[in-house]
Structure formats: C-alpha cells, structure tokens
C-alpha cells in the first residue's frame, strides 16, 4: 500500500456544546495541525498515488475555509458539537470532493489540537 501525506497548521476557534464542557464551553483558539494521508495499492501512469500539488491544493482550500474562523458559526457544524473528531470528519468530506484520483482508495484526516492530542477520521473513498 502506498501513502502520501501533506500537512499544514492554522489557527481556528470553537467552543464545545456538550453538557458541562467546563472552560471548553467558552470560545477559544487552537493552533491546529492538519494531516491528510492518501492511501492506495497502485500508482498512476506517472508513478504517483496522488499528485502532490493536488493534495496541497486540497489542503490549502480546507485551510482557507477554517483559518481564523469560529467553527460553531459554519453550516457544516450546525447541530453538532464541533469536536476535533467532528472536524476531522467534516474535512474528510471536503477533501474527497476535491481530490478524485482513481488510485486513492483511502483517506485519513488527522487533526492535532495541541502537542499531545489529535483525532483522525479514516475511510475508503
């Protein structure tokens, strides 16, 4: 299985909407690090799993959407607790709409909310 990973960092804000979230229930910022790992069993005719420029463009598009935004205010989080797990799932959907290479069979989105905590969403595309 081949894999290609791209990553970036950005700042965004959120507040948790679960019962008794403590201080996380107030708007606050995270310096997120986002990793996109594309996987597949074969390479294309150019010996790429995914064109790295396309992967970076998808990452840039996602970053532009969320950088310096309050996640709670965005329609994709309406009715959901904007946890880092939910954030990873939302990003997965956006990236799979952008990167459609036939050689990519799986995508893993990992979002670090600080130096010691991350969540991932991994699925077949």
Image (cartoon, grey):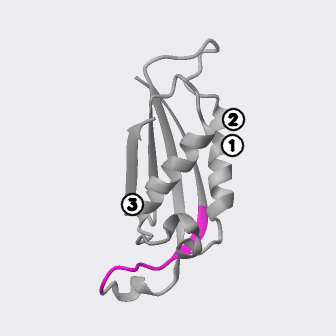
Q: Name the disc covering residue 85, or none.
A: 3
- Residue drawn at (41%, 68%), measured in percent from left and top? 83
Q: Any magenta on residue 13?
A: yes
Marks 2 and 1, Cα distance to the nearest angstrom? 6 Å
Q: How many marks?
A: 3
x, y (%) of residue 33? 52, 58
Q: Are marks 2 and 1 in contact (CB under 8 Å)?
A: yes
Q: Residue at x 51, y 44 (%)?
A: 36
- Per the rendered image, the range of residues in magenta is 10-19
Secondary structure beneath dot 1 equals helix
| Residue bearing mark 2 | 53
**Mark 3: secondary structure:** helix
Q: CA distance from mark 3 to mark 2?
A: 26 Å
> How would you rate the neighbour count of disc 1 (Cα within 10 Å): few for under 14, some for 14-19, many for 20 or more?
some
Q: Farthest residue toward the top?
A: 45
Q: Up-down: is 19 above or below 68?
A: below
> Per the image, is 74 magenta?
no
């Amino acid at each position: 299985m081949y894999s290609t990973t791209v990553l970036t960092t950005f700042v965004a804000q959120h507040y948790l909407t679960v019962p008794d979230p403590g201080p996380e229930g107030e708007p606050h910022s995270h310096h997120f690090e986002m990793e996109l790992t594309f996987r597949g069993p074969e390479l294309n005719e150019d010996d790429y799993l995914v064109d790295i420029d396309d992967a970076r463009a998808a990452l840039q598009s996602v970053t532009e959407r969320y950088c310096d935004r309050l996640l709670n205010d965005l329609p994709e989080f309406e009715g959901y607790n904007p946890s880092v797990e939910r954030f990873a799932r939302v990003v997965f959907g956006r990236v799979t709409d952008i990167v459609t290479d036939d050689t990519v069979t799986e995508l893993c989105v990992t979002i670090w909310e600080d130096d010691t905590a991350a969540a991932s969403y991994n699925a077949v595309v």
